[in-house]
Every structure is written in structure tokens, then in C-alpha cells.
């Protein structure tokens, strides 16, 4: 049963895309890892809301399953794994960044401008490709990659990788109205297992170097 018309769905997706873009930019200057992980859970909740809008507009049973899967993996499982790993390594702040917060924020805004320049013309396509949805998705991917590159702690780099995946997820929601069920489950399981493995690796780095700064891995070179 279709409960939302296309125009209403597009307006809601446009608003959610802007909120997701705000969370992506807001993650750049954050120094506390726990706050970064909570913001990541907030992104997952907004992505679940975007998937719910698509479900209500299409009436597809698969789309409703995608909403439940998004909440389970992106709001509960992945942030839960990261918070558990953070408690294991006993690190509260991200003190080491490759760039100071202000230049980093300016560069992140520059990446958003590039994303709008590249993906903005695609908003004229039909379906759920609204004015802001696809550029915001590309912005999340670029900003997630950028934050992963400028952070030095292993867990904060994992947060950047998950943020990139969130951008890709938003892109699939607005461009394809959701992936096939088997692919959706495969991606969700792959993400959860990947984050779990990276959390274990971060714990092992901490046990070896008493730190999760990835710069210490350079000492392992032969």
C-alpha cells in the first residue's frame, strides 16, 4: 500500500539528505570518539528514516524490511561494536589529527561544493533523485574518506569508513529505491563483520603499542 505521494516523498528525502550532510560536516571537528560514534548512530537513524520514506512511497515489502535492517545494523549493531571496542582500548579523545580543525572544516566544505558541482545536474532525473539527495550522498562519501585520512586513531578511521558506506547507502536508496533483498542482507552482514574485525584489530594494536595510533604500525616495516 502506497501511503506517500512522490512529491511529499521527495520533499522528505530532500530534508533528510540535508540533515545527513550536516552530520557529515559536524563529524569533522569532533575530538571525542564517543561523540563521533553517537553521531554515526544518528546518521543510521536518518538513513532508516530515508528508507522508510521510500517504503511508504513504493509500498514494497522489501523496502520495509530494508528499514528494519538499517535500524538493526546502522543504529544498533555497528555503533554498539564501536562503543565496546572503545571501552576495551580506553581511549576517550582523538587528540591527533593530520590537520587543525579549522582548515579541515574548510576542506570538508570544499568537498561538499565539489560534490554539488558534480552530482547537482543529476537532480533533473525522475524518481527520488531530488535536488539535494544525490549531492549529499556524494558529499558524505567524500567527507567520510577525508576524515578517515586525517585521523590517526584506528577507531576514528573505522568511523570514517562507515560514514563513507552511509553515503553509498543513501545513494542507492535515492537512485535505485533500494537494493535487491539478497544484496541488501549481504552488504549489511559485510558491514557488521567488517567493523567487528576492525574493532578486534584496534584492540590488538592497543595491546601491542598501548595506543591505537596507526602511525605506530610503521615500526613493523621490514
Image (cartoon, grey):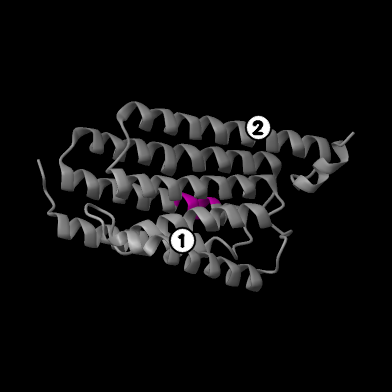
Residue 64 magenta-highlighted: no
Please give left or right for residue 44 compared with residue 27 in the image.
left
Indicate the quadrant where residue 103 lies: bottom right
Pick the front one: 39 or 51: 51
**In this rendering, is residue 158 above or below 13?**
above
Indicate the quadrant where residue 202 lies: top right
Q: Are discs 1 and 2 less than 8 Å apart at CB?
A: no
User: Residue 18 placed where, x, y %?
Assistant: 37, 64
Q: Residue at x 26, y 56 (%)?
A: 125
Q: Which secondary structure type mostly characterizes the magenta part of the structure?
A: helix
| Highlighted magenta segment, given as a residue range | 37-41
User: Residue 144 placed where, x, y %?
Assistant: 55, 54
Marks 1/2: CA–CA distance: 26 Å
User: Residue 32 placed where, x, y %?
Assistant: 62, 58
Indicate the quadrant where residue 210 lies: top right
Pick the front one: 79 or 43: 43
Please give left or right for residue 207 compared with residue 134 in the image.
right
- Is residue 181 among the parts visible in the rendering? yes
SS assignment at label 1: helix
Q: Residues within 10 Å of mark 1 (few under 14, many from 20)?
A: some
Q: Residue at x 82, y 35 (%)?
A: 208
- Is residue 93 among the parts visible in the rendering? no
Residue 112, which numbered label? Answer: none
Residue 200, which numbered label? Answer: 2
Residue 23, which numbered label? Answer: 1
Q: Residues within 10 Å of mark 2 (few under 14, many from 20)?
A: some
User: Residue 109 placed where, x, y %?
Assistant: 53, 69
Q: Residue at x 56, y 36 (%)?
A: 195
- First reached walking from the N terminus: tag 1 or tag 2: 1
Q: Residue at x 42, y 37 (%)?
A: 73
Amino acid at each position: 500500500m502506497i501511503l506517500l505521494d512522490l512529491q511529499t516523498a521527495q520533499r522528505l528525502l530532500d530534508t533528510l539528505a540535508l540533515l545527513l550532510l550536516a552530520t557529515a560536516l559536524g563529524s569533522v571537528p569532533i575530538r571525542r570518539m564517543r561523540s563521533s560514534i553517537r553521531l554515526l548512530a544518528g546518521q543510521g537513524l536518518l538513513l532508516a528514516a530515508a528508507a522508510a520514506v521510500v517504503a511508504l512511497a513504493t509500498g514494497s515489502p522489501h523496502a520495509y524490511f530494508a528499514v528494519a535492517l538499517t535500524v538493526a545494523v546502522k543504529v544498533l549493531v555497528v555503533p554498539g561494536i564501536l562503543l565496546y571496542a572503545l571501552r576495551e582500548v580506553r581511549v576517550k579523545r582523538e587528540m591527533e589529527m593530520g590537520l587543525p580543525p579549522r582548515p579541515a572544516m574548510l576542506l570538508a566544505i570544499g568537498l561538499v561544493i565539489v560534490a554539488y558541482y558534480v552530482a547537482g545536474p543529476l537532480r533533473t532525473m525522475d524518481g527520488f533523485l531530488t535536488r539535494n539527495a544525490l549531492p549529499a550522498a556524494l558529499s558524505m562519501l567524500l567527507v567520510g574518506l577525508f576524515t578517515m585520512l586525517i585521523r590517526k586513531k584506528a577507531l576514528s578511521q573505522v568511523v570514517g569508513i562507515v560514514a563513507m558506506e552511509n553515503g553509498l547507502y543513501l545513494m542507492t536508496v535515492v537512485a535505485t529505491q533500494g537494493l535487491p533483498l539478497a544484496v541488501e542482507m549481504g552488504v549489511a552482514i559485510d558491514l557488521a563483520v567488517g567493523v567487528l574485525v576492525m574493532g578486534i584489530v584496534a584492540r590488538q594494536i592497543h595491546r601491542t603499542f598501548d595506543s591505537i595510533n596507526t602511525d605506530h604500525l610503521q615500526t613493523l616495516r621490514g
